[in-house]
């Protein structure tokens, strides 16, 4: 049986569980997440692996980059990622990586970028299945009415992450 190395990390917005497999980050998800069990089953089944609570080089690097991000010293991550999901989910997650720091898009805009403006619900569902929060910035997707909607870490965490990025975006640009 293969092993997914997992480690817990307390972010300013809630506890995260980070997972790595064969040198890639496969999970950065909120511990108090209602989909926690679904994501765990998906990863373990697809990778034919169990969780093993121990750090890894990738997790250590991910935590360092998260610390820099929360300290407003990092706007982009360079951790190797491993997406575990359907081809459609992977296409959505790949598109999330294109949303710039400090910017938001609606689910409708995301659907259009993926070439199917009618797939708003499917895109929202795939967005919600993202197991690599923050690194794959699903927090940057908002409702078409510009309201904060649905986030695995809770709306307070989503608001916190967006405030971290957007309220200081101009300050970043001037340095």
Image (cartoon, rainbow, N blue to C red):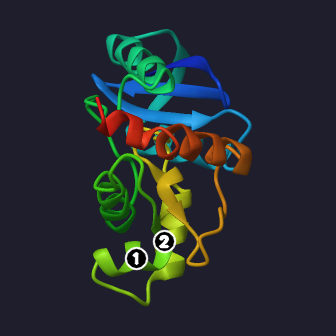
In the rendered structure, the answer to whether residue 174 lies left or right of residue 16 reads left
**Residue 109: which numbered mark, if any?**
1
Of 66 and 15, the residue lying toward us: 66
- Residue 170 point in image, percent of width and height: 39, 42
Vertical side of 18 occupied by 108: above or below: below
Measure how far apart labels 1 and 2 are at the Cα level.
5 Å
Mark count: 2
- Residue 18 point in image, percent of width and height: 50, 26
**Residue 136: which numbered mark, if any?**
none
Of 161 and 34, the residue lying toward us: 161
- Residue 19 point in image, percent of width and height: 47, 26
Element at label 2: strand
**Residue 106: which numbered mark, if any?**
2
Q: Which quadrant would residue 9 be assigned to in this image?
A: top right
**Cβ–Cβ below 8 Å for labels 1 and 2?**
yes
Of 22 and 167, the residue lying toward us: 167
Question: Badge 1 local density, few (<14 within 10 Å), some, or many (20+)?
Answer: some
Q: Which quadrant would residue 7 be assigned to in this image?
A: top right
Q: Where, quadrant-wise, is the N terminus in this rendering? A: top left
Question: Badge 2 local density, few (<14 within 10 Å), some, or many (20+)?
Answer: some
Identify which residue is drawn at 27% across, 22% down.
Answer: 23
Of 39 and 79, the residue lying toward us: 79
In the rendered structure, the answer to whether residue 64 lies left or right of residue 142 reads left
Farthest residue, direction front: 174
- Residue 67 point in image, percent of width and height: 47, 18
Element at label 1: helix
Q: Where, quadrant-wise, is the C terminus in this rendering? A: top left
Identify which residue is drawn at 46% across, 41% down.
Answer: 132
């Amino acid at each position: 049986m293969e092993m997914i190395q997992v480690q817990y990390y307390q972010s300013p917005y809630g506890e995260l569980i980070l997972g790595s497999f064969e040198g890639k980050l496969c999970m950065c998800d909120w511990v108090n997440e209602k989909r926690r069990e679904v994501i765990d089953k998906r990863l373990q089944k697809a990778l034919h692996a169990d969780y093993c609570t121990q750090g890894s080089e990738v997790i250590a690097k991910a935590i360092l980059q998260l610390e820099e991000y929360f300290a407003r010293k990092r706007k982009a991550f360079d951790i190797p990622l491993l997406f575990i999901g359907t081809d459609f989910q992977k296409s959505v997650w790949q598109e999330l990586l294109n949303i710039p720091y400090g910017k938001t898009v609606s689910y409708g805009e995301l659907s259009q970028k993926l070439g199917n403006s009618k797939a708003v619900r499917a895109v929202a569902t795939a967005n919600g299945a993202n197991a690599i929060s923050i690194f794959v910035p699903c927090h940057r997707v908002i409702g078409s009415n510009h309201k904060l909607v649905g986030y695995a870490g809770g709306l307070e965490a989503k608001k916190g992450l967006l405030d971290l990025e957007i309220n200081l975006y101009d300050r970043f640009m001037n340095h």
